[in-house]
Amino acid sequence: MKTTTYLKVLIGSFFMLLLISSCKNETKTETSTSTTKTTETGEVNKQGQAFIEDDVSKSNVLQIAIGSPDHTTLVAAVQAAELENVLVNAGPLMVFAPTNAAFDALPEGTVENLLKPENKDALANILKHHVTAGNYSKDFLKKFKKLGQANDQNTTVETKGDDVYVGGAKILASIPAGNGIVHVVDKVILPPSE
């Protein structure tokens, strides 16, 4: 009887030791707030919540922009400013997403200049001026006169008939997102100059 109990304890201890050692050998993953890192081979390794693929959840505001052929310039700007992870947080976020035509309407060379690495901060400021906390429909926005944007500046809200203008940009369409709402706008909303 003692021998059987001893063997059970010995076998149980062996399995417990095996379980503990297998847990210690798991590979730990490093988390980083940076959205991109360059590997030794020169390849860009995208990191962060923005790059997690999920086929089940409702698309977030970044995924909606990435999936739209009318927002390729906006997506390029978000990537150049490394703001991808900001646009996938839990929110709720309200993003006023200028179309490619809205960027094309800017003075010639403006977009190309803003996409340069040395202008990353200015680009980020402009993009953050297109984002505010909340998840308000176009009709609900009619109740506002101003919105506080993510760059700590305000922008105006105007109603003309059934149309709503934010910072002078007309809302063309609204798309609900998993972490807020995307309002497609016809102009780039520039922050007020200081």
Image (cartoon, rainbow, N blue to C red):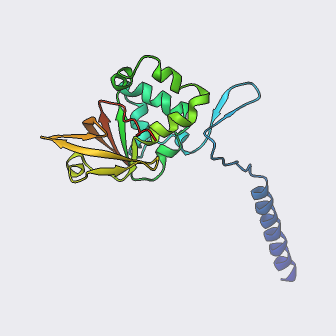
User: How many callouts does the rendering have?
Assistant: 0
x and y, in percent, of residue 116 in the image: 57, 25
Q: Is residue 189 left or right of residue 51?
A: left
Using the image, determine if residue 161 lies above or below residue 43: below
Regarding residue 65, the answer to whether it shows in the image is yes
Q: Can you name the residue that lies furthest to the left here?
A: 161
x and y, in percent, of residue 81 in the image: 54, 34
Location of residue 69 (image quadrant): top left
On the rendered image, what quadrant is the N terminus found in?
A: bottom right
Location of residue 34 (image quadrant): top right
Of 155 and 94, nearer the camera is 155
Of 174 and 130, nearer the camera is 130
Q: Is residue 72 left or right of residue 2?
A: left
Q: Can you name the residue that lies furthest to the front here?
A: 194
Residue in the image at 25% along x and 48% along y: 137
Regarding residue 178, the answer to whether it shows in the image is no
Of 103 and 122, nearer the camera is 122
Residue in the image at 78% along x and 67% along y: 16
x and y, in percent, of residue 47 in the image: 62, 40
